[in-house]
Image (cartoon, rainbow, N blue to C red):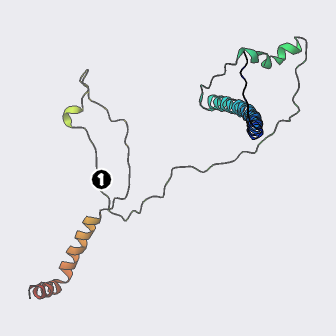
Amino acid sequence: MPIQVTITADELAALLAIREAYGSLQREHDEVRSTLRLVTAERDLAEERLRAYRRELFGAKSEARASEQLGLFNEAEALGANATPAQEDTPELTVAAHTRKKRGHRKPLDPNVPRDVVRHELPEAERFCTNDGHALVEFGVEISCYVAWNLRRNRRVLSRVRRERFPELLRQHRETRRL
């Protein structure tokens, strides 16, 4: 048994407007869903490319190739055994010889600079072999010269020189400081 409902014309118009709005919203929803599918597919493709680039950049550096790429490098087998090898058209180039500067040589130090000689020698007890007891032989000497600056020592020297040269000025200075 069907149920009968009576509505007014205004209510019918409102229901039809709602149905029309629902239809337009349904179409808009379908468009958004298809756009979402498209954007998702593009994102997945971009992520796959990014993974491939990262594998290429940071992955293991192996010369091994995938099985589907093995046919790319067998051109010689494809040409056959009776094919003639290709001749290169590049002529041989000759390059003139040249001389290079010797590296690692610095200017000799000034001979007027005072020198200190420091010898590093083994103690007398360590100059014999521990296995068979024979005397060890000196087989090389390494000499290294460099300029060593000691600012404190230079300051002390300067202050001593002043005291020896001007003792009367020092006495006057001390006396005026006491007053």
- Residue 148 on image: x %, y %: 34, 59
For the C terminus, give its image quadrant.
bottom left
* Residue 24 image offset from top left, x and y in percent: 77, 37
Q: Which residue lies at the image location 8% right of the left edge and 85% below the top edge?
A: 178
Tell me if mark 1 has few (under 14), some (14-19) or many (20+) residues whose alpha carbon lies within 10 angstroms of its own. few
- Above/below status of 14 relative to 165: above
Secondary structure beneath dot 1 equals loop
Q: Looking at the image, which residue sits at the far top? A: 81
Q: Check disc 1 and report the residue beneath it.
A: 117
Q: Residue at x 38, y 49 (%)?
A: 144
Q: Is residue 117 above or below residue 78?
A: below
Of residues 173 and 116, which is closer to you in this image?
A: 173
Front residue of 55 and 17 = 17
| Residue at image location 65% in from the left, 29% down from the top | 56
Picture layout, residue 173 above or below residue 87? below
Q: Amino acid at mark 1?
A: Val
The picture places residue 169, in percent across and down from the top left corner, at: 17, 86
116, 11: nearer the viewer: 11
Relative to 117, is 172 on the left or the right? Answer: left
Q: Position of residue 161 (x, y in %)?
A: 22, 76
Quarter holding the N terminus is: top right
Residue in the image at 66% along x and 48% along y: 99
Q: Which residue is situated farthest in the right direction here?
A: 83
